[in-house]
């Protein structure tokens, strides 16, 4: 009886432990649990920490919805940091019927756990197929120069939008975080010619930048010089106008006084003229009525002081 009791206790304890472990599970940050009951979807648990479910009849599927995952095309990364080339995935035709070799990758995460688990069989493989199809379709709508030069960002964004639309249409439950164009180059046979073209474009851009820099430096200087000349001209104009107006006013005043006392004003004007001219004389010549020089009086640059 004791042995049977012990065995029964062991069975009960084992069943209790199995029941406990079958009904309790833990969710970490960024994880969700999809719960099915007898194969039927019952809901998605997003509560972090300890959670419960019915043992035996319910099953949990834990999915990380925050982890960013990577899908590579044209190459595969290895644990030691090297790469394995996959040329069949990287060769594609451009819109102007040129061949381009392009390695690229997409970054994604799970946004709907139920769709990711149950809507499509092997969603990662499906994502790879539709991603390659989307990439080839969009590259085929652009000329080679767009892919090799400054349109990479626009092409990546276009692929990302197109890929998300298709992924949602097939209910993959996946959110595309980014599309990364790693390398894009023409085939080896024509690569040298394309490098020459790229070098010429860079030189052209450098010359344009230099010209723009010179323009930005010279235009403000020219505008400043023009403003300076205009201001000087305006100042000279104002000065001449003021001088002319002063002379007119002086002449009008003299004319008025001359009309009152002509003889006195005539004498005064004559003396003022002598006072202005004589200080600049170096000497005085005395001549007769026949213009013969009679005498020279040197002044030594001191002139004559005409009394007021």
Image (tube, rainbow, N blue to C red):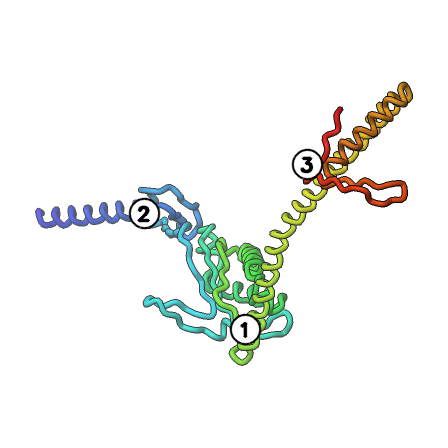
Q: From the viewer's perspective, is residue 191 above or below residue 284?
A: below
Horizontal placement of 123 versus 299: left or right?
A: left
Label 1, label 3: how far apart the Cα atoms are: 86 Å
Residue 304, given in percent of the width and then of the height, sits at 73, 33
Which corner quadrant of the image does residue 245 belong to?
top right
- Residue 111, x across and y down, in percent: 47, 50
- Give the mark toward the camera: 1 or 3: 3
Q: Residue at x 63, y 48 (%)?
A: 221
Q: CA distance from mark 2 to mark 3?
A: 131 Å
Which label number is shown at residue 55?
Answer: 2
Q: Are marks 2 and 1 in contact (CB under 8 Å)?
A: no
What residue is shown at x 36% (from left), y 69% (from top)? Answer: 82
Question: Farthest residue toward the bottom?
Answer: 189
Instruction: Specify the label residue 195 is tagged with.
Output: 1
Q: Secondary structure at mark 3?
A: loop
Q: Residue at x 14, y 50 (%)?
A: 7
Q: Residue furthest left?
A: 2
- Work out which quarter of the rendered image holds the C terminus and state it: top right
Q: CA distance from mark 2 to mark 1?
A: 66 Å
- Residue 64 lies, in percent from the top left, at 39, 51
Q: Is residue 188 above or below residue 208?
A: below
Q: Is residue 252 visible?
A: no
Q: Dot 3 surroundings within 10 Å: few (below 14), some, or many (20 or more)?
A: few
Q: Position of residue 243 (x, y in %)?
A: 78, 32
193 vs 277: above or below:
below
Q: Nearer the viewer, residue 189 or 113?
A: 189
Residue count near mark 1 (Cα–Cα under 10 Å), binned few <14, some 14–19, many ≥20: few
The number of discs equals 3
* Residue furthest front as drawn: 294
Give the residue pinned by disc 3: 302
Nearer to us: label 2 or label 3: 3
């Amino acid at each position: 009886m004791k042995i049977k009791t012990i065995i029964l206790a062991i069975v009960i304890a084992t069943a209790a432990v199995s029941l406990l472990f079958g009904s309790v599970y833990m969710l970490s940050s960024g994880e969700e649990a999809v719960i099915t009951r007898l194969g039927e979807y019952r809901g998605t648990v997003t509560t972090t920490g300890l959670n419960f479910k019915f043992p035996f009849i319910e099953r949990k599927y834990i999915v990380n919805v925050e982890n960013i995952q990577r899908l590579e095309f044209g190459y595969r990364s290895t644990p030691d940091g090297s790469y394995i080339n996959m040329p069949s995935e990287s060769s594609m035709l451009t819109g102007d019927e040129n061949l381009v070799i392009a390695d690229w990758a997409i970054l994604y995460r799970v946004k709907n756990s139920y769709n990711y688990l149950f809507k499509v069989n092997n969603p990662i493989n499906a994502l790879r197929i539709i991603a390659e199809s989307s990439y080839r379709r969009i590259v085929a709508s652009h000329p080679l120069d767009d892919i090799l030069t400054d349109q990479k960002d626009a092409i990546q964004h276009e692929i990302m939008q197109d890929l998300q639309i298709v992924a949602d249409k097939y209910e993959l439950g996946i959110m595309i975080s980014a599309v990364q164009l790693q390398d894009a180059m023409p085939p080896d046979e024509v690569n040298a010619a394309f490098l020459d073209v790229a070098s010429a474009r860079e030189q052209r851009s450098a010359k344009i930048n230099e010209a723009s820099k010179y323009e930005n430096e010279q235009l403000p200087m020219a505008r400043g010089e023009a403003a300076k000349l205009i201001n000087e001209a305006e100042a000279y104009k104002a000065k001449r106008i003021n001088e002319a107006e002063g002379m007119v006013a002086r002449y009008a005043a003299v004319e008025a006084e001359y009309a009152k006392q002509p003889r006195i004003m005539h004498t005064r004007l004559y003396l003022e003229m002598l006072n202005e001219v004589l200080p600049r004389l170096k000497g005085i010549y005395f001549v007769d009525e026949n213009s013969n020089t009679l005498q020279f009086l040197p002044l030594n640059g001191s002139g004559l002081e005409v009394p007021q």
